[in-house]
Amino acid sequence: MEVTPHLTFSGQCEAAFEFYARALGGTIVTMLPYGNSPLAEQVPSEWRGKILHASLAVGNTTLLGADVLPDDYEQPRGFFVTLSIDDPVDAQRKFEALAENGTVRMPIQKTFWSPAFGVLVDQFGVPWEISCEQKQA
């Protein structure tokens, strides 16, 4: 079994996934607009350039995303997308990249459970936790 986060946006999915690809060092695998799908006629014409399905490969994980019509969109809450990163320097770099134009809720720092842990909400409203695993002696 595999658990895959699927994020929704109110029209910024393409910009968000391009940002995540840069910030996380991932590769966009899919970027399918509504206008190039069988659903083209079911959305307003101005929405056809928005994204029906996006996928981003990051390490051995895939992040999925889509734009939903404004009446169906809800701001993300009640969860975090958590990145577990082996190296504290890399964790710091990814934290800073994702925090660009976002809101830092907890600066990345050493905690009793992690050499580098931080919490932020990115510029697209997605909540993230960056966690560096404690090395076992």
Image (cartoon, rainbow, N blue to C red):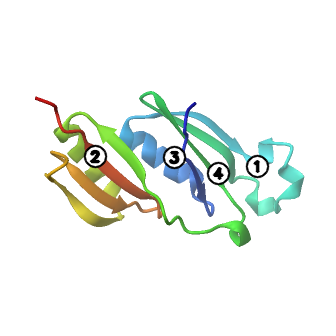
Q: Nearer the viewer, mark 2 or mark 4?
A: 2
Query: What amino acid is at disc 2?
Result: Ser
Q: Nearer the viewer, mark 3 or mark 4?
A: 4
**What residue sits right under mark 2 in the picture?**
131
Query: What amino acid is at disc 3?
Result: Phe
- Res. 100 visible in picture: no
Give the image quarter of residue 118: bottom left
Say the numbered circle drawn on residue 57: none
In the picture shown, does residue 56 fall above or below 74? above
Give the image quarter of residue 94: top left
Give the image quarter of residue 104: bottom left
**What residue sits right under mark 4 in the picture?**
66
Work out how far the residue at label 1 is from the one at label 3, CA to CA, in angstroms. 16 Å
Residue 84: image x %, image y %? 32, 40
Q: Nearer the viewer, residue 127 or 3?
A: 3
Work out how far the residue at label 2 is from the one at label 4, CA to CA, in angstroms. 26 Å
In the picture shown, does residue 5 fall above or below 69? above
Mark with earlier residue (3, 2): 3
**Crowding at label 2, few (<14), some or many (≥20) Cα neighbours within 10 Å?**
many
Residue 51: image x %, image y %? 67, 50
Mark with earlier residue (2, 1): 1
**What residue sits right under mark 1 in the picture?**
34
Work out how far the residue at label 1 is from the one at label 4, CA to CA, in angstroms. 10 Å
